[in-house]
Image (cartoon, grey):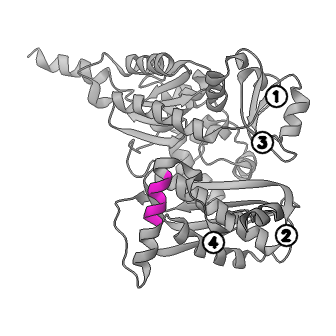
Amino acid sequence: MRSVPATVVLVSGFAEHILHVDMDAFFVEVERLDDPSLRGVPVVVGGLGRRGVVASASYEARARGVRSAMPIGEARRLCPNARFVAPSHRRYREVSGQVFDILRSFSPVVEGISIDEAFLDVAGLRLLWPDAVAIGGEIRAAVRSRIGIPASVGCATTKFIAKLASERAKPDGLLVVEAGTELAFLHPLPVTDLWGVGAATKAALSSLGIRTIGDVANTPVETLVRTLGTAVGTHLHDLANARDPRDVGAGPGTRSVSVEETFTDDLAARDDLERELVRLCDRLEGRLRRVRLRGHTVTLKVRFADFTTVTRSATVEGDVGFRSELWPVVRVLLDRARVGGRAVRLLGVGVSGLETDTGARQLRFGGERVDAASRAAASIKERFGEDAIVPARLVEPPSDSERRRLR
C-alpha cells in the first residue's frame, strides 16, 4: 500500500521535467575565458568593419542600450568605452561542444536549439534526483566549474514556458514555473513573447486590442483564426493557454543550418558574387559536417544596397551537404534572383529539411568520383582544420614577384 503514495511523490516532483539551458552572453563569456582583462567591463563582439553588426554584448554594454544585430557604429555611439572584439567562431564551436558534453552527461534527451542553448527532458532521472530544479542547479554549477562560464536555466512543464523562464532567469540564474502556475506566469507577459509574433502579427493583434498573452488566451480562437489564419491563430491560442505538446528531441533539434556574409564594399560583378557564394557553400558544408546533418532544401538570400532582400529556394532530389552538391543549386538560385548588376551588400546560403547524415548516398551516374573527392576533402578538414583545403576558385592568384620566383 505504501508504494502508491511513494510513486506519486516521485512523479509529482518531476512535473517540471523540461529544462531550457541558455548560456549568458555566450560569445562574450568565451572571449573573457581567453582574455581576463575583459571581465567587468562592457564588451561587444561583432564585425568591426563599417558594416559590422553586434553578435553579442555583455550585460554591462546592454545596460547602455547595445543589442544583438545592431550596427556596430551605433553600438560604438551608445557605449564608446566598450571593448570591441572580432568574433572567434571556431573557438565558440569548441566551447559549445564542451557545454553539450556536460548536458548529455545529465540526460540523453538533449535537443540543441543553437550553439549556446538546448532543451533537456530529465523525467527519466526522477529516481536519482529529488526534482528537476536540483538538476538545473547542478548543470549550472558544472558549466561554471568545468568551463568557467555562466548559464541560466528555466524549468517548466512545457518547452515554451521553460524557454521563457530561462530568459527571465538571466543573467546567471534559475527559474522554475511550477505545475499549475503556468497561466499566472504567462498571462501578464507581452504578446511579443509568444513564439511566432513578429511585427505584422503584433499589429494585427493590436487592432483587436490585444496587448498581453492573457488577452490572447481570453480571445475566442475563432476571432484569432479569422484575423491571423487557421495555423497561426490556433498556434497562438494554444501557447497562450499553456498548451504545448511538443516533446524534447521529437524531430531534428535544428530546423536549418545557414551562413551569411555582409560585405564591407558592395558587390555587383557576377564573378565576385559567384566567388563569395562558393566560399559560403564551403563554410556551410563545414557546419553541416560538424553536426552530421544533410538537407533537402537549399535557400539563397540576397540583400541589396537599398536593404531590399530576396530569397530563392529549391528542393532537390535526394539530399545535399557537400560543397560540390550545394554550389550547382546555389548558382541556379542566383540566376532566379535576377541580380542584374545591382549592388549587393549581403549573401547567405542555408539548408533545411535536415536529416542525420548516415553516410548513405543516392546513386547517380558519374557521381561516385565526385562523392569520393568530397569525402576525402572532408576527412582532411576534420583532421587538419577548415583551411587545410579550399576550392581552387578561392585561391588568390600569385603576385608578379611570386610568378617570377616560381619560374
Residue positioned most to the left:
1
Disc assigned to residue 65: 1
Q: Is residue 257 visible?
A: yes
- Report the predominant secondary structure element of the magenta stretch: helix
Q: With respect to residue 265, does 81 lie above or below? A: above
How many residues crowd mark 3 within 10 Å: few (<14), some (14–19), many (20+)?
some
Which residue, given by chain and number where applicable, does mark 4 sit on? 330
Disc assigned to residue 47: 3
How many residues crowd mark 1 within 10 Å: few (<14), some (14–19), many (20+)?
some
Q: Secondary structure at mark 2?
A: loop
Return the disc, 4 or 3, that comes first in the chain's sequence: 3
Q: Is residue 218 magenta?
A: no
Q: Quadrant of residue 192?
A: top right
Q: Amino acid at mark 3?
A: Gly
Q: Secondary structure at mark 3?
A: loop
Which residue, given by chain and number where applicable, does mark 2 sit on? 268
Q: Which residues are magenta?
A: 374-381
- Inter-mark Cα distance, 1 to 4: 38 Å
Q: With respect to residue 348, does 70 lie above or below? A: above
